[in-house]
Image (cartoon, rainbow, N blue to C red):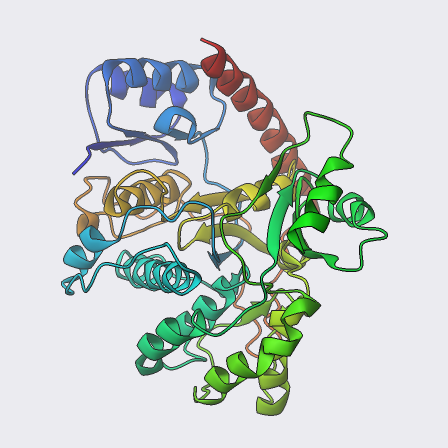
Amino acid sequence: MTDILLAAAAGPGALGTALRSGRRGGTGPCRVAVLDPTAERIAQALALIDRGEPWHGGNDIWFAPRPGPAGRTVFLFPGLDARTGPPPDDVLRWLGRPAGPATGAATLAERTHATLRLNRVLHAALLRAGIVPDAMAGHSAGEWSALFAAGLFPEPAFDEFARTMGAAPVPDVVFAAVGLPAEAAARLAEGEPRVVLSHDNGPDQSVLCGDEDAVTRCLARIADPEVPRRVLPFRSGFHSPMLAPYLPGFSAVFDRVPLARPAVPVWSATTVAPYPDDETELRALLDRHLVEPVRFRAVIERLYEQGARVFVQAGCGSLTRFVAATLAGRPHLTVSAGSPTRPQLDQLRWAAAALWAEGHAPDLAALGLTGPTADPVPSARAVTGVHPRTGAIPVTHPVADAYEAAVAAVSASVETVYRTWKERT
């Protein structure tokens, strides 16, 4: 299990002194977390502490001179991604559950099952670690994970759902991610009736879906060679009208799942609103979700307007990057409980350490982490609970938000310069 250094103090000066003397733990609002604390990383952490500027995970260092933005926490569940990440067997052992059979990723059914399984395991692990959401949202198939996690879909239905949902027939069309906002990506498809915009992920990424030859022509219209473009390694036609003839196969799976009232609001990336209470409307939305575009950027914007500030990815994907791009320059926090490369339990522990550094109170002991025992310093901008029906989340004070936006912008600039330097050296 990878070592994580956690230290806290009243301010940067005291924290730097403690770190130089080799002390861990401590109490106070100024906090640092260092994954695999080598001498080089500790030296980098000390340089950041001396400057007193926030640092959010670059080179596996997390430094917060003060508690992070106050607001509600949202769990985000990724859908199918180009990288599936290591299996969560280590997390299952930590949870005291059997690992279960290995899940492949060669077919759409296998990839869907693996994604939903990892999302499910990490959601359970986050709850055990004392990290709980005020609302949930998903990206594409990840929206099904959110429905299970919130209890709207009952837990006993998961195994059959996960096995059968990706096995239904789908059209032979491709997805292509492009580094353009949705409006510009949609213009690439003008004159191509078999190509549509299927995902609005953020201001710097959209996805086109359609016949392979037609999508190839669309990508060739991107004049700037620096604009990223990539055909994704799965085909389904999800979130496009091309799936409509195949929808009955998916509807039959939905019809077999009983519905319950969710424990927390689940936001739809189709309607950009919480899922409705009415069963007829809800089941109709499940079908719409498969043939209409994913409006993930709009969901994040709306959640932010409603007071969400902390976004935790319960799976392996790119959602933290989409959130960061959408909310650039505004105070917020993103962490991922899943990783495409490192062991999932190590990533879960690192996510908890990052949240702790920002003033949250995960169960460090449960994760084998040693940290201060005192509660985090409460924010002066306390918030009330989520509205039980609408999912509305209280907003914070505009003056405080403006101040934190300035701090976030400076921090982002510093971190970008550092990462660019590391890539070139």
Q: Residue at x 46, y 87 (%)?
A: 259
Identify the residue at the far top of this view. Answer: 425
Horizontal and vertical percent position of residue 129: 27, 56
Residue 303 lies, with reference to residue 228, above or below; the image says below
Q: Quadrant of residue 395?
A: bottom right
- Viewer-proximal residue among 304 and 279: 279
Residue 330 lies, with reference to residue 101, above or below; the image says above
Q: Residue at x 23, y 45 (%)?
A: 373
Horizontal and vertical percent position of residue 137: 53, 63
Identify the residue at the far front of this view. Answer: 213
Q: Residue at x 39, y 77 (%)?
A: 161
Res 67 seen here: yes
Position of residue 13 in the picture relative to residue 93 (left or right): right
Position of residue 7 in the picture relative to residue 307 (left or right): left
Residue 425 lies, with reference to residue 68, above or below; the image says above
Q: Where does the C terminus fall, quadrant-wise?
A: top left
User: How many badges with numbers are in the image?
Assistant: 0
Res 327 seen here: no
Horizontal and vertical percent position of residue 342: 29, 38
Position of residue 36 in the picture relative to residue 389 (left or right): left
- Viewer-proximal residue among 77 and 256: 256
Q: Quadrant of residue 194?
A: bottom right
Q: Where does the N terminus fall, quadrant-wise?
A: top left
Horizontal and vertical percent position of residue 252: 50, 86
Position of residue 276 in the picture relative to residue 261 (left or right): right
Residue 46 lies, with reference to residue 376, above or below; the image says above
